[in-house]
Image (cartoon, rainbow, N blue to C red):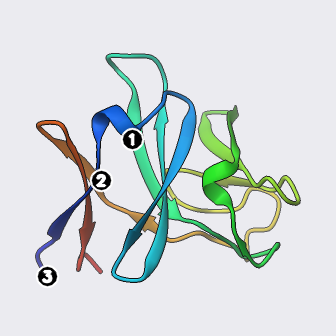
Amino acid sequence: MSIEWHNVCGTDDLVINSGVCALLNGQQIAIFKVGTAPDAGIYAVDNFDPQGKAQVIYRGIIGSIGDKTVVASPLYKQHFDLASGECIESPDQKLQVWPVRVQGNSVQIGTGAN
């Protein structure tokens, strides 16, 4: 199945080591720009915290555990790997991960990849 790409925000809307929230097809997606310019990576994960039962992941704190780049939930502080969505403390919890790319000055999220 091919990926359909959707513009969700501009690259200027992202702040390094911080998150924003976008709404795509009724789904809240947390988008993070991590690292230092110009090599900053962009990640997109589900904004819904499965433990806190709230749409808050975009407000989480970015960090690292070992070689994993993570976001800590602002509610209960559990850590989610931004690349895989896996929860470090509770492997049974996982965030959906979205493909993301930059085209010109637009950040795009991919759907239909599964």
Give the image location of residue 100, x and y in percent: 30, 53
Q: Residues within 10 Å of mark 2 (few under 14, many from 20)?
A: many
Give the image location of residue 89, x and y in percent: 82, 59
Mark 1 to mark 2: distance in Å?
7 Å
Query: What mark, if any, has residue 1 been given in the picture?
Result: 3
Query: What mark, if any, has residue 61 been given in the picture?
Result: none
Residue 47 horizontal side relative to residue 109, left or right: right
Q: Residue at x 79, y 53 (%)?
A: 74
* Residue 57, picture quadrant: bottom right
Q: Earlier in the sequence, mark 3 or mark 2?
A: 3
Relative depth, front residue between 96 and 8: 8
According to the picture, the residue beneath numbered tag 1 turns out to be: 42
Q: Residue at x 38, y 16 (%)?
A: 37
Give the image location of residue 104, x and y in percent: 11, 37
Query: What mark, if any, has residue 100 been given in the picture?
Result: 2
Q: Nearer the viewer, mark 3 or mark 2?
A: 2
Q: Residue at x 58, y 69 (%)?
A: 95
Q: Is residue 112 above or below residue 37?
A: below
**Residue type marked 3:** Met
Mark 3 to mark 2: distance in Å?
16 Å
- Element type where label 2 sits in the image: strand
Q: Nearer the viewer, mark 3 or mark 1?
A: 1
**Residue type marked 2:** Val
Asked whether the beta carbons under mark 1 and mark 2 sit within 8 Å of each other, the answer is yes
- Element type where label 1 sits in the image: strand
* Residue 67, picture quadrant: top right
Residue extending farthest top: 37
> Quadrant of the image for the N terminus?
bottom left
Q: Earlier in the sequence, mark 1 or mark 2?
A: 1
Q: Is residue 107 above or below residue 25?
A: above
**Residue type marked 1:** Ile
